[in-house]
Image (spheres, helix red, strand yellow):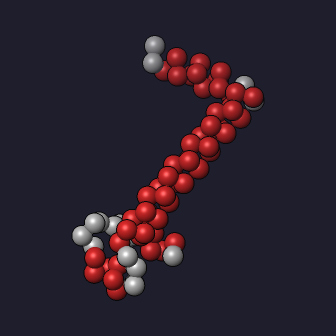
Amino acid sequence: MLGISLLSLSLGDLQFCLSLDLHPSPVSSFHIWLGHLSMILFAAHTVGFIIYWAITNQMALVLALLLIMFS
């Protein structure tokens, strides 16, 4: 089922859904929810790294480097 979700879907792709005995509405819904889940995981991963950098004082080093580069 995961392989099916990685394929691009369009609303007019009825032949693909019928060949797998799937209805277009649940497949589109599954595709949308998989996109939401991947965005939540990406955001949580990013926030986790920002917290880690702040705790280990790497954030100050990166910000100082950026200030030097863009000044």
Q: Total of numbered circles in the picture?
A: 0
Instruction: Name the residue furthest left.
Output: 12
**Could you say which is closer to the camera, residue 48 or residue 37?**
37
Instruction: Name the residue furthest top.
Output: 71
**Could you say which is closer to the camera, residue 71 or residue 3?**
3
Instruction: Name the residue furthest right.
Output: 56
Where residue 33 appears, x then y in whole percent? Answer: 49, 58
Where residue 39 appears, x then y in whole percent? Answer: 51, 49
The picture quadrant where one finds residue 7 is bottom left
The answer to whether residue 6 shows anywhere in this view is no
> Is residue 25 shown left or right of residue 57?
left
Residue drawn at (43%, 63%) of the image? 29
Q: Is residue 71 above or below residue 37?
A: above
**Could you say which is closer to the camera, residue 12 or residue 69?**
12
Residue drawn at (28%, 66%) of the image? 11
Where residue 38 appears, x then y in whole percent? Answer: 53, 54
> Is residue 43 shown left or right of residue 9?
right
The answer to whether residue 3 shows anywhere in this view is yes
Q: Is residue 40 above or below residue 18?
A: above
Residue drawn at (69%, 32%) of the image? 51
Where residue 46 appears, x then y in whole percent? Answer: 59, 40
**Could you say which is closer to the camera, residue 51 or residue 61?**
51
Residue drawn at (59%, 50%) of the image? 41
Q: Is residue 62 above or below residue 18?
A: above
